[in-house]
Image: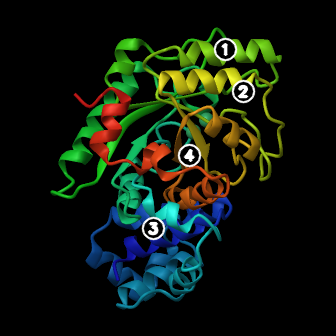
Amino acid sequence: MDAVDALNEIAFWLERELAPTFKVQAFRKAAGIIGGLDPAEVAARARTGRLKSMKGIGDRTFEVIRQAVDGGVPDYLEGLRERGQQPLAAGGTELHSALRGDLHSHSDWSDGGSPIELMADAARTLGREYLALTDHSPSLKIANGLSAERLTEQLDIVADINNDDGGGNFRLLAGIEVDILEDGTLDQSPDMLDRLDVVVASVHSKLRSDRRTMTARMLGAISDPQMNVLGHCTGRLVQGSRGTRPQSEFDAERVFAACAERGVAVEINSRPERQDPPDELIRLALDAGCLFSIDSDAHAPGQLDFLQYGAERAASNGVPAERIVTTWPLDRLLEWTGRGK
Ligand SMILES: [Zn+2]
Ligand SMILES: [Zn+2]
């Protein structure tokens, strides 16, 4: 087995089960190190044990590489593959299999942990027909948000990945998770947004604003015709290493009515620590006639599989597949985002 593939696949399975970042990064880093070497040299160094003395190769990564160059599937990977056969979520299986794509993901260009190419490869492997790359916008400095210049550069890389797809039917969509600023405007120029396939807009600051302020802020963004998806609308955190955070206060009836009127999809954010919106708001949005987008908000390749959690929540709240834009074929999706021409 190819040692780089083995290390990356191990990282994938660990990310999927939310293993600590340092643990995952050891495998990603080792893959990067030996990926830059001649495979014959890697094999020779693995057999003699010399690889062990390289910076960034530890006992466990060495053992994985050694077993891979010996031609087998490393034991550690074998165990993870077995565990990975278990679905992440018990319900929503039918809806999950109807999902074609994912409109929210991050690369190491903002606060994700992996290069764009690895995110695209993993999405392809998971059978997605499309994945939107939605790195953060400039005002989110803590997450290394992209300036217009960096986003322009990123567009070329996205185009290259699509050109190199080798006749497959996977498409990496150019996108953004743009901040909804305090005045309700979007944190990127209209010209720049116009060059993208998908615009997800989210609130990331002043989450404790009073109800009137937050409602006005969200309505302002939703009235912008370039917005397609309202990301993690309450901002709550229900578990995980970042602790918990209550949901933002806003007039959900007015916000969802505006989404329905404008054709903006309400995101069902699949991250286990977010589970956003809460059940009662999913049902409110459903009654308001909203569209939905089940997104992973993946910050690493293995997290792309989180869609299982989102599908389970959508199904348990009675959201029909037809109302979920990520079950739509790509041409219909792009027609809806207004970028299909
Ligand atoms: Zn976000
Ligand atoms: Zn995000």
Q: Earlier in the sequence, mark 1 or mark 3?
A: 3
State the separation of the CA atoms marked 4 and 2: 22 Å
**Residue behind label 4 places its C-beta within 8 angstroms of ligand 2:** yes
Q: Quadrant of ligand 2?
A: top right
State the separation of the CA atoms marked 2 and 1: 12 Å
Residue 276 placement: quadrant: top right
Q: Residue at x 70, y 48 (%)?
A: 275
Amino acid type shown at disc 1: Arg
Tell me, yes or no, whether the two marked residues, 2 and 1, touch with CB atoms within 8 Å. no
Disc 4 is placed on an element classified as loop
Scheme of colours in the image: rainbow
Amino acid type shown at disc 2: Ala
Between marks 2 and 1 in the image, the one whose residue lies nearer the viewer: 2
Tell me, yes or no, whether the two marked residues, 4 and 2, touch with CB atoms within 8 Å. no
Residue 297, label in figure: 4
Around disc 4, counting alpha carbons within 10 Å, would you say few (fewer than 14), some (14 to 19), or many (20 or more)? many
Q: Give the residue pinned by disc 1.
A: 217
Between marks 1 and 4 in the image, the one whose residue lies nearer the viewer: 1
